[in-house]
Amino acid sequence: MAAKRSVIPFGPQHPVLPEPIHIDLVTEDEKVVEAIPSIGFVHRGLEQLVTKKDFGEMVYVAERICGICSFGHGYGYVKTIEHIMGIEPTDRARYIRTMLFELSRMHSHILWLGLMADAFGFESLFMETWKIREKILDMLEAATGGRVIFSIMRIGGLRKDVPDDVMKGFLPELDKVVEGIKACEAAFLSDPAVLGRLKGVGYISKEDAIALGCEGPFLRASGVEHDNRMRGYAAYGDMDFKIITSDEGDSYGRCYVRIHEIYESASIVRQCIEKMPQEGIYVPIKGFPNGEHMTVIEQPRGGACYYVHASGKKFIERMRVRTPTFANIPALAKTLQGCDVADVPILVVTIDPCISCTER
Amino acid sequence: MTFANFTKTELKNLFRKPATDKYPNGPASLKESTRGHVSNNMDACVLCSVCQMRCPTGAITVDRKAQTWTIRPFSCIQCRRCVDNCPKKSLSMQKEYTEPDQIKKEQVFDLSDRQKEVLAEQARQAAERAKAALEAGKKKSSE
Amino acid sequence: MLDGLEIVELTGLLNNIKAVKTDGFSLMQICATKIDESYEILYTFGKGYDIRNLKTVVREGEHVPSITDMFEAAYLYENEIHDLFGIAVDGINHDYKGTLYRTAEETPFR
């Protein structure tokens, strides 16, 4: 006898979700047969605000698209405008941007580890990872003055220089962070109870990951070697780092990729501080942007596209941000098909959903 | 030893002091560069309203008639743009965070008496100069 | 200034996209821009680190064909364009009929 189908609404309020997303789960007994996502609960129309704010002020708005990827959004917008206006930022500005970008990648990944630990019910691991994350937030606060919204970006460079002695002070702190994550890694990647919740959950093959347009650690966990940092923007061209991939394709693989990316990021931050050039941080700008351009950068959650269409006026006609979570939703809907209802929270967390980014 | 993976960290944490600050009951650990709230030194302010023009959220109002400088802390996003653009360096970024409140109140700064006199004196001198220039112009045209 | 930009007619859109797919590209994004009374739709495709862009112009009232039979994941972008700009897209595999963005205003970017 065929099981009766029923629809379970998941979200917008759910203990595992820090932000509102709604998914209708069509289930047969305990199995999910279809998942229908629906967003729009935090749609603020920030893309449209670009037609009402002057393009220099828009940097602050772009940063506020999301609290966790704030630096990346500010950077993506500024980089696009700089390309249109033909501005080349100074070396020191490029290096400081790279350093801050990697620090925000680290804090985003550690935040995700905590949320994941919370999703599979390991409270003390959740607390421990967030305690480590606090060290990175302190570093960011010492460098920029803000903990999550940095307000340091500016078209043409940076608004504020980071003193060399402050940056030198980051090096011992970074060692402590890496040491702390090493202790947590043992719990994430070899604890049998944790493995039971992660191994084989939400498998997606390499072919599917490419066809469905996955991004970031979600894509790399399926064995695809793709990282937009390899395009060499900012100072990534001068840095020595490798792309972390995993062939597992499941939640365990995603956990592995993110943990090892934290180590790579720490190494990039160290390289930036050691090679930091000494010169100005700001190139003055003239006139208004005219033209269109699309920039692709690697956010903590994956590749993000920034499209700006300007027509030589104070206000820009259109800004479009394609965030990694948006690209990952089709793959999420696919992995949810055929999973157990009990695994849904882990699967939703596993793509590192950032709903504020997705809806802008 | 897979079961003891995290036990060591947990046991250590059991005997450690709390990792958090007791804010607001105790002081928060703030950095030198923390952006908390904007303050204005009314001994130096000349009410030029550059800050009002630069503020991306329109949180600052300068009233020249009443000689006041007003900020709405609930609109302020602590971006430091007004502080960086202040020509007299009278604005400064303080480390302490804005205090929570039940209503979205405004914070009004009155110009100090000394600064009021300075501005009045400057205005008088400017008026005199303008008058002198006007008379000089009249003389020239009549010649 | 866009990488590999090609401007195509709406009628030849599907054939062009088919050619891009044959070259092994996958979909990166679709976005719409309102220019005066018409809309520009930009399709971005990526293969490794290569990017190709296709742009087409849609006038008020014209329908856009869906590309979901070639790129499965395109449904999200097409629903987004429909919900925010009010551009009708024909033949989406998962047509949410305006429920992807549950905004107070029906088509806020129109």
Image: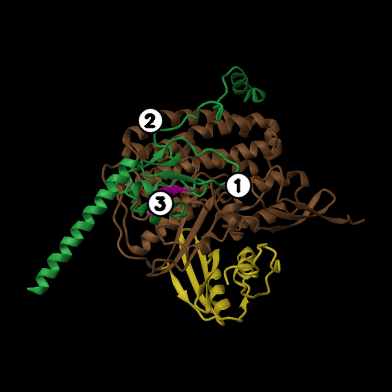
Furthest-right residue in view?
A1
Q: Secondary structure at mark 1?
A: loop
Q: Amino acid at mark 2?
A: Gly
Q: Which mark is residue A39?
A: none
Residue B101 visible in the picture: yes
Cα separation between marks 3 and 1: 52 Å
Q: Is residue C57 above or below residue A298?
A: below
For label 3, the residue is B66
Q: Which chain is green?
A: B
Do discs 3 and 2 share a chain?
no
The N terminus of chain B sits in image quarter: top right
Do discs 3 and 1 share a chain?
no
State the residue at coordinates (57%, 51%).
A219
Q: Is residue A103 above or below residue B131?
A: above
Q: Which residues are the magenta region?
A: B65-71
Q: Amino acid at mark 3?
A: Ala
Magenta stretch: includes residue B68: yes
State the residue at coordinates (69%, 67%).
C98
- Residue A8 position, x and y percent, is 80, 52
Q: Cβ–Cβ below 8 Å for labels 2 and 1?
A: no
Cα separation between marks 2 and 1: 30 Å
For label 2, the residue is A169
Cα separation between marks 3 and 2: 48 Å
Q: Amino acid at mark 1?
A: Asp
The C terminus of chain B sits in image quarter: bottom left
For label 1, the residue is A352
Q: Nearer the viewer, mark 3 or mark 1?
A: 3
Q: Chain of mark 1?
A: A
Mark 3: give few (<14), some (14-19) or many (20+) Cα within 10 Å: few
Q: Cβ–Cβ below 8 Å for labels 3 and 2?
A: no
